[in-house]
Image (cartoon, coloured by chain):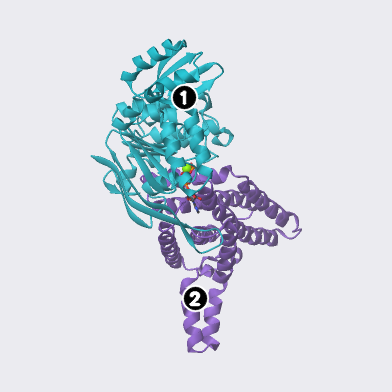
Chain colours: A purple, B cyan
Amino acid sequence: MKSISSIALNTFRESIREKLMVIALFFGALLFASSYILSPLAVGARAKIVLDVGLAAVSLLGILTTIMIGSTLLHKEVDRRAIYMVLTRPVSRLEYLIGKFWGILLAVAGVVAVMTAVMVLMLMLGKVALRPVVFMALYLTLLEIAVVCSIVVFFSTFTTPVLTSFFSVCLVVAGSLSGDLKVFAEKFGGAVTRRIVDALYYMLPNLKVFNLRHEAVHDLPYRAGDLWLVTLYAAVYCGVVIYIAHLIFKRRDFA
Amino acid sequence: MTVLRVEKVKKSFRGEMSLAKREVLHGVSLHLSSGEIMGFLGPNGAGKTTTIKIMLGLTRPDSGEVRILERPAGDRSAMARVGYLPENPYFYPHLSLDEFLGFCGQMSGMGREGMQRRISEVIELVGLIQHRGQRIKGFSKGMLQRAGLAQAILHKPDLLILDEPFSGLDPLGRVMVRDLLLEMKRRGTTIFFSSHILPDMETLCDRTCIIREGVIVRHLGLDELIRLGEGKIEVTARGCGDDAVEAVREYIESRSDTGDETFLVVKKQEFLRTVMQVLYNHGSEILRVVTKHPTLEEVFLSEISGRRKNKGAGGSKRESAVSRKGVRAR
Ligand SMILES: Nc1ncnc2c1ncn2[C@@H]1O[C@H](COP(=O)(O)OP(=O)(O)OP(=O)(O)O)[C@@H](O)[C@H]1O
Ligand SMILES: [Mg+2]
């Protein structure tokens, strides 16, 4: 447990000392600013735009940052052999991966926190009341990022940064559509199509469940009970993916 | 107690482009008892680093067995008691030396109390006091090597496995490492290290093991290393004609000339008197009589070149280079 937290902390430290984070934050700030400046509208409408763009930006930039940091981190460590320092100590490879996962997540959570702070500040300046549903949406975004993070860690255990990024992006896109695909297949597909789509549906992350942004922007009702289910879903998904990643990583030769 | 046991380990690597495998370790076996220092010697590409990585569980052997502190390679409880210095070490560049060692200590399961003190201690030992707050990113090769040693001994391991601990170090650094290893040994640490610096190896090791092209070709125990030290007697004379040399022919092993000086290696201690007498009678002036010792380097070179000679003409040149060099004075 202690080694997991030290690895996570070290990973976090490494990521925030990378300039990459600065870039992510910069783009985040830029996006917010532009949504603010480009909306010479009534106060209510402007607030909605800020919230809409803001929440989308947090999610998008969070996912991109995760992929950017995550895809190179492990590879760099193996490539430069810094990983020897960890694996030749009483640390299992599973602990190593879990530590990496938490470290990346922690770093991205930092980015998300800063972006959230900027957004909240802008909303407060616009004298808009913050509803709890906004924070629920942000919480779900964090869960979404965690799921993406596990996917990135998974790919990075056996492939290059470029391919890791590519596969991760593919999975994120597929994951955002998998719900629709299932509905579509159920309506129109044959038995075989439905089987395949079903299998895909359970394998791909269903990222749609993490999207509470629409409700947050338009202040629509949502079911609080579902949040627990979604949390559980994210935890199980991450756990399974990291475990499979570990099965691959365990076999790796560091020659 | 056998602290490290490598049994008939084989390992092959796939080629860059082809799928064909090339075997680089052909059944390597090694045994290291508690408290010993063993040197691991071999030319570039012989398989030293590969063997060491297999010991630590970084690489899996194709066949054979490794037991480290009576556990399988890479075993968790064993690794808590092992210190490892990789070849050309590289660490997290974003950390300062202090932070890095703190991280290593935590990884090794060291308690918080005492860790800071121990970190200061090892930083002092490896001579990096002025650099402890500096990011590792800016370290020179020798500084990296020192940092590597610091992390290897940090948690007071029972077994130290060092891949070329002397590489990249200045002369002071080399003395530092030598003293460090002797001190560790005095405290009962078992040490296994590879090196190309033979004089250091000779003075440090209880045993030496020579690997060539993935095969252990020679084990030199303490007794053999001592026997290496049993020297030969060399007589240096001036004004020594061919007739004089001819007269002592049966007592000498070899002859060489530099300017007007002639060097004669006497076959046995008891011939020395006769040789000197004969030379004297032939009117040559005896300048010196010294005892010379063959070095590990010569044993090593002859082991290496022995194979080359079998392979072709290239080797004989090496062999003659060795014999020309003769024996070195101690
Ligand atoms: N990852 C790898 N892939 C393919 N071949 C490898 C790999 N690592 C080592 N080898 C090969 O294995 C052989 C042994 O290499 P190794 O690094 O163990 O040598 P070494 O004895 O440590 O040499 P040096 O003194 O130069 O450090 C070499 O022929 C090398 O080409
Ligand atoms: Mg090597």
Q: Which mark is residue B320?
A: none
For residue B255, the mark is 1
Check the image and report above or below for B3 versus A61. Answer: above
Residues at marks 1 and 2 on the same chain: no
Q: Residue at x 41, y 24 (%)?
A: B249
Residue placed most toward the observer, B138 or A143: B138
Residue B178: x and y, percent? Answer: 41, 26
Tell me if I can see residue A157 in this picture.
yes
Q: Is residue A36 above or below residue B272?
A: below
Classify 10 Å Cα crowding around label 1: few (below 14), some (14-19), many (20 and above).
some
The location of residue B105, given as percent across then percent down, is 39, 37
Most foreground residue, B240 or A162: B240
- Placement of the N terminus of chain B among the 4 image quadrants: top left
**Rendered location of residue A179, percent (x, y):** 53, 75
Horizontally, residue B91 falls left or right of residue B280, namely right
Chain ID for label 1? B
Using the rendered image of the protein, determine whether residue B91 is visible from the camera's viewpoint.
Answer: no
Q: CA distance from mark 1 to mark 2?
A: 84 Å
Q: Amino acid at mark 1?
A: Arg
- In the displayed structure, does residue B253 sit left or right of residue A55? left
The amino acid at mark 2 is Leu
Position of residue A194 relative to residue A20, above or below, is below
Category of crowding for the residue at label 2, using alpha-carbon neighbours closer than 10 angstroms: few (below 14), some (14–19), many (at least 20): some
Q: Which residue is mark 2?
A: A200
Secondary structure beneath dot 2 equals helix
Q: Nearer the viewer, residue B176 or A111?
A: B176
Q: Quadrant of the C terminus of chain B?
A: top left
Image location of residue B139, percent across then percent down: 56, 33
